[in-house]
Amino acid sequence: MHRLKKHITFIIGFIFLSRHIIDTRSSVTNDLSLGFTRLPFNKSYYINHKPYNLPLDKRYSLINGVHKLWVFSTDEPFSRGSPTHPRSELFINGYKYSTGVWQFEAHVFVPHGTSGVSLMQVFGGNPHATTLMVRVYDGNLYYYRNKVMFRDIYDKWFRLNVIHDVEGNSVKVYINGVLKFKGHGRGGTKHYFKCGVYAQDKDSFYMESRWKHIKIYKKSN
């Protein structure tokens, strides 16, 4: 009986250790920053795009590290005479690139009702204007309008990672560390990241997103 108890204890300990090792390996595998160098990010690395006729604080706030951006479907574009739709975005102009592997990371919150809007862009393409748009329609995340990447995003924080390999002609989208989309690039010679709200087709009257822990990475040589 004593030997049996020792044997059972050994087996239980082995199972616990195995699970711990597996969990540890999983967490390392899901560290999307491995092989990348984190770059500085602060106000000097971005500018705001918002309706040209409104002061910034009418469509943007930064409180306790959370960027809140909102817009109405009836708003003006970001510049007078522009044919583009209403937007309130962070234009990360401090990191424009034409080569290499770049990564955008942030935690995102989208309130219920926001729909028909681009949340994040990899700008630059040929003949297209962008390489990637992450959009939301009726509470689901889309690659442009074609593919659902993640469902039921309203009223919860989630982590978004986008990796753009220029020479490799690929773009990947991860949600909470899980690969949700992998596709080809769309050409272009100059790229940068944007995030916020940018009205698209069938846009809701009010659109809002919130962002925190924004990080920019570049693949190490």
Image (spheres, grey):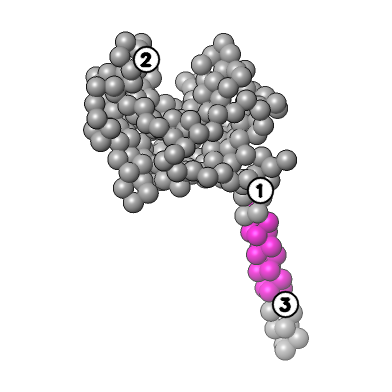
Q: Is residue 90 left or right of residue 15?
A: left
2 or 3: mark nearer the eye: 2
Q: Main secondary structure of the magenta part?
A: helix
Q: Is residue 131 left or right of residue 197?
A: right
Q: Earlier in the sequence, mark 3 or mark 1?
A: 3
* Residue denoted by label 1: 34
Range shown magenta = 10-26
Kindly report the distance in space between the C-alpha atoms of the residues bearing marks 3 and 1: 35 Å
Q: Quadrant of residue 55?
A: top left
Tag 1's secondary structure?
loop
Q: Quadrant of residue 50?
A: top left
Q: Look at the numbered discs 3 and 1 and tell me whether their residues touch, using CB distance below 8 Å.
A: no
Q: Horizontal and vertical percent for residue 78?
A: 33, 21
Q: Which mark is residue 84?
A: 2
Q: Which mark is residue 221?
A: none
Kindly report the distance in space between the C-alpha atoms of the residues bearing marks 1 and 2: 37 Å
Kindly report the distance in space between the C-alpha atoms of the residues bearing marks 2 and 3: 66 Å
Image quadrant holding the C terminus, namely top right
Q: Residue at x 70, y 26 (%)?
A: 167
Image quadrant holding the N terminus, namely bottom right
Determine the residue located farthest toward the bottom in the rendered image. 2
Can you say whether 13 is above or below 189 in the image? below
Q: What amino acid type should be assigned to the residue bearing mark 3?
A: Phe
Q: Horizontal and vertical percent for residue 24?
A: 65, 60
Q: Earlier in the sequence, mark 1 or mark 2?
A: 1
* Residue denoted by label 3: 10
Tag 2's secondary structure?
loop
Q: Horizontal and vertical percent for residue 21?
A: 69, 62
